[in-house]
């Protein structure tokens, strides 16, 4: 998958106890499980031979430790804008639990009480997109699922709610880039294992 244009590699952190159970993990700083650590080490092999001008990480230990175990800890710079969605009152709860109280709820459409809306997350994603376009080089990012989904939507010019159209597994690698020129942002690869 070569390209003459910069490519942005997105890595979702390895498995945590809450990602395994389906609990919303925004600002709770969960460690990786042993399986999550092994998957993070595997990311190194899948990125072997690629070069990046910069490596950015969410400040969460699950994302940052994934970058370390993948072999990028010495270059990984934490960026607060890469934090996962702030789920507020829904932190630690599963979608099933939330739907029992609030039928039809969707995080991308409805946001979270005492937490962030899609527009809030989209504003952070927009700042990252601006930094990526200004850098004009290939960058590696470690973060969490819902944030990376919104980032992909904003990369493409979709509204933040467009993140609902993408799904990410733990320790997956996705690639954002361009097609014919820098005016044509695309998804080059999504949710790769």
Image (tube, grey):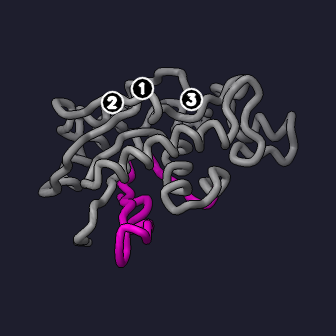
Report crowding for label 3: few under 14, some 14 to 19, many 20 or more residues within 10 A (C-alpha). Answer: many
Residue at the outermost left position: 49
Q: Position of residue 180 (x, y in %)?
A: 35, 78
Q: Residue at x 56, y 60 (%)?
A: 157
Q: Is residue 75 magenta?
A: no
Could you tell me which secondary element the residue under label 1 belongs to? loop
Could you tell me which secondary element the residue under label 3 belongs to? loop
Q: Which mark is residue 64?
A: 2
Q: Which mark is residue 162?
A: none
Note whether 93 is above or below 181 in the view shown.
above
The residue lying toward the viewer, choosing from 10 and 120, is: 120
Mark 2 → mark 1, Cα distance in angstroms = 6 Å
Residue holding disc 3: 26
Q: Residue at x 38, y 57 (%)?
A: 174
Q: Which residues are magenta?
A: 164-193
Q: Position of residue 172 (x, y in %)?
A: 39, 52
The residue lying toward the viewer, choosing from 133 and 111, is: 133
Note whether 21 is above or below 156 in the view shown.
above
Q: Quadrant of residue 76?
A: top left
Please report contact status of discs 2 and 1: CB closer than 8 Å, yes or no.
yes
Residue holding disc 1: 60
Dot 2 or dot 3: first in sequence order is 3
Note whether 53 is above or below 113 in the view shown.
below
Q: Quadrant of residue 191?
A: bottom left
């Amino acid at each position: 998958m070569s390209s003459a244009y910069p490519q942005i590699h997105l890595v979702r952190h390895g498995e945590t106890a809450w990602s395994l159970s389906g609990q919303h993990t925004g600002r709770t700083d969960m460690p990786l499980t042993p399986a999550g650590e092994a998957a993070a080490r595997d990311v190194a092999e899948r990125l072997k031979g690629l070069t990046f001008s910069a490596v950015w990480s969410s400040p969460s230990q699950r994302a940052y430790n994934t970058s370390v175990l993948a072999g990028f800890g010495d270059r990984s710079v934490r960026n607060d804008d890469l934090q996962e969605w702030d789920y507020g009152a829904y932190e630690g709860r599963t979608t099933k639990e939330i739907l029992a109280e609030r039928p039809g709820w969707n995080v991308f459409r409805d946001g979270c009480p005492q937490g962030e809306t899609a527009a809030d997350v989209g504003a952070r994603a927009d700042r990252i997109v601006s930094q990526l376009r200004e850098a004009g080089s290939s960058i590696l990012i470690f973060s969490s699922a819902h944030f990376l989904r919104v980032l992909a939507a904003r990369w493409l010019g979709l509204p933040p709610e467009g993140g609902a159209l993408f799904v990410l597994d733990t320790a997956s690698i996705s690639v954002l880039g361009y097609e014919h020129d820098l005016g044509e942002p695309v998804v080059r690869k999504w949710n790769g294992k």
